[in-house]
Amino acid sequence: MSLRSTPIANGFYRLLNRLLPFLQRHVKSPNQLTMLGVVIAACAPLAFYFSPLAGMIFIGLSGLADTTDGLLAKSAGKQSAYGAFFDSTLDRFSDFFYLLGFWVRFWRRDAAASSAILVLCALLFTFLISYSKARAESLGQVLAIGLMERGFRTLYLIVWALLLALFPDAQDYLLWTGLVLFCVLTLATAIQRILYVRARLLPK
């Protein structure tokens, strides 16, 4: 399952396509957008310190830059193997900063120690999803299954942050529920991918 195939995503990409002429005039390389996305992501933990809404905005802007770099590369004919590698590698930095932002909210509520293990598990399962895809593709397998691919993960975090902003009185409940659910979904996706590749690579 991919976020790109949903009606909401189709409308979003049509909007981005209208921005491409502006980007083509002002951005020299898609890698600049990739790096900008990581810089914005690095600001997300500080933004979360002040409010979940600020954190949500920074995650959204970082995700926007990460989405647009690929569209810019394709439209400008600047797609390259290194660009794909560079983008995928820097995405791991962004994943870390996004989750660190939510940990900051736990820290603000004196739950830094009690939440640390789950946050680390969320980070591990996130990296497993990405690594399993990269490793499977290196073995000649196409791996595009699982709910929590990167687009859905980013959308999940944006919605989670929005709920924290809208319901401040329920922040403790929403923080823990959101983190546990994120861990469950990412672990399930990682296991699903492992089993999928196992069924195709093991001799029958």
Image: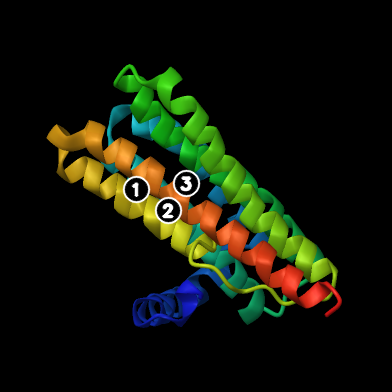
Q: Which residue is mark 3?
A: 183
- Residue for point 38% across, 56% down: 156
**Dot in front, 3 or 1:** 3
For label 2, the residue is 61
Amino acid type assigned to the residue bearing label 1 in the image: Ile
Left or right? Give the position of 39 relative to 199: left
Residue 84 location, x and y as percent?
73, 65
Residues packed near mark 1 inside 10 Å, few (<14), some (14 to 19) or many (20 plus): some
Q: Is residue 2 visible?
A: yes
Residue 88 in picture, x, y percent from top left = 68, 57
Residues tagged 2 and 1 counted as in contact (Cβ below 8 A): yes
Q: Amino acid at mark 2?
A: Leu
Q: Is residue 15 left or right of residue 137?
A: left
Who's the residue at 44% across and 18% down the image?
A: 113
Name the secondary structure under disc 1: helix
Label 3 vs label 1: CA separation? 22 Å
Whether residue 24 is situated above or below residue 125 in the rendered picture: below
Identify the colour scheme used. rainbow
Would you identify the image quadrant in which residue 155 lies?
bottom left
In the image, which disc is placed on residue 57?
Answer: 1
Indicate the secondary structure of the residue bearing disc 2.
Answer: helix
